[in-house]
Amino acid sequence: MLPDPSGPTLRALRGLVLATGLAFILLVPGWVQILGGRPGPFVRPWRMYSGVGRDLCEVRYEQRLPDGRSVAVDRLEVLGLGPNAPMFQRELVGVGAVRADARRLCQNLGPAADLRATVRCAGPQGWAPAIGPEEPLCKR
Amino acid sequence: MQALIDRWRAHLVHEGSTRAVALMRIGFVLLVWSRYADEILPFRHRGWDWWLLVPAFFVATTAMLFGVQTRLATVATACVLATMYGVFGWLGGHEPWVHHHTYLLNIGVVWLALTPCGRSFSVDRWRAVRHAEITGAEPPPERGPLWAVPLLAAQCSAVYLWSAVDKTNVRFLSGDQLESILMHFYSGSEPVSVPGFATVCLVASVFVVLVEYVLPVALFVRRWHPWVVLFAMLFHGVLYVAIPVGTFTLTMWVYFLAYVDPEAVHRFVDQLTGRPYATSGLTPR
């Protein structure tokens, strides 16, 4: 090791910066993530992708036929969007968006359509059932 | 306790090869350009504040990349990035500049400014060698005080640790959150038709959390590096391909250099260039 040219003042300064920096890096996120403090420019939690996919609903549409059978409904096809529709059209965020989507489908399927859906949405505790197949979605 | 204090004191004066921090300097500044340069080009903006930012950004980062007055250039780059983050991002409401991946990149440059990252792979180094040649002296060793390098390693470990803490909940560990994230990017609200998709997401979620709890510590164990660093790079590589993470993966790859033995990096570069282990001026510790 080369003899260190730094004096005691510089060494003390290094020690102070290093100790403060390590404490800042390792402990400050806990202020938000454990103690529930407000994040700020210098108080950063490490929550990555925690909001992505939140409230996204998985939707299985089906149409009840007069003979009692059920057939799956491809919403992209019925809405004329096609299989390569952009994501903002493929994704339904929140139950309100699903119900609005169902209304459009009902219009396209015709006045006699009996549209049902099994819907679950991504909530704070994971998937949660939102709409069941017992509920008719088209107004008669 | 005394041994710990002695070790702390020794660390504050320890010097080592500067090649690893120099590589970090080059890596970070290229990522800074990749992330910000196109966005701040003058033709995109009208305000006077942007006209001040543009020259400051490009002068500081260019000097940092090539290693011209490197310490000053790195401090200047850190100041520019701090301004972009704090003034334009937080105060000005430019939300993309306060994202976690931009913060991680910015703070990396801030910590790097505390290291002698210009003593290798730089114009400063070239000038020092030239000066030695002219005066007939020995070229200065590529060494410097590395007391601040643990800040970079700790920053990287903190990302894993606190991300793992954030994911330790029912929503993530059940696989539900990963399912909805992947659906957000790939299928939208259509049910995923891949058999076993939910099970794969469950297993992957538990695996990710385990990895994020283990890596912050495992990366500090140098004898595990051949496997742990390779695994961590692969882990981030998969994330890079699977979901849009921007510069995050490459930023983490650069951060990994903070864990690696600087002498090993030095020897590796010597091996690449076919030179013996002599240019650092000292024998390895």
Image: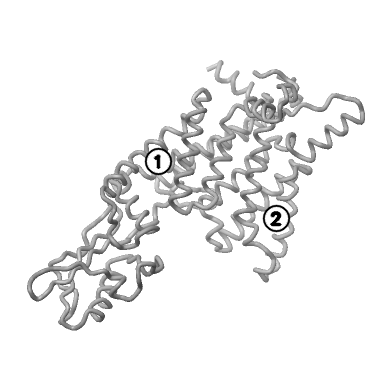
As drawn, is A41 to the left or to the right of A2? left
Residue closest to the eye, B154 or B32: B32
Q: Amino acid at mark 1?
A: Ala
Say which quarter of the image contains residue A54: bottom left
User: Looking at the rendered structure, which numbered label has been put on residue B82?
Assistant: none
Q: Nearer the viewer, residue B24 or A14?
A: B24
Which numbered disc covers residue B164?
A: 1
Q: How is the image coloured?
A: one colour
**Residue A85 seen in this snapshot:** yes
Q: Position of residue B267 (x, y in %)?
A: 66, 25
Both marks 1 and 2 on one chain: yes
Residue B151 position in % (x across, y down): 58, 35
Q: State the quadrant of the C terminus of chain B.
A: top right
> Who's the residue at 67% across and 43% down the image?
B26
Q: Residue at x 76, y 39 (%)?
A: B122
Q: Work out whether residue A20 can be spotted.
A: no
Where is residue B85 drawn, in percent x and y?
Answer: 59, 55
Relative height, residue B156 to residue B218 (above, below) = below
**Any mark on residue B57, and which?**
2
Q: Is residue B274 above or below residue B179?
A: above
Which chain contains the residue that carries disc 2?
B
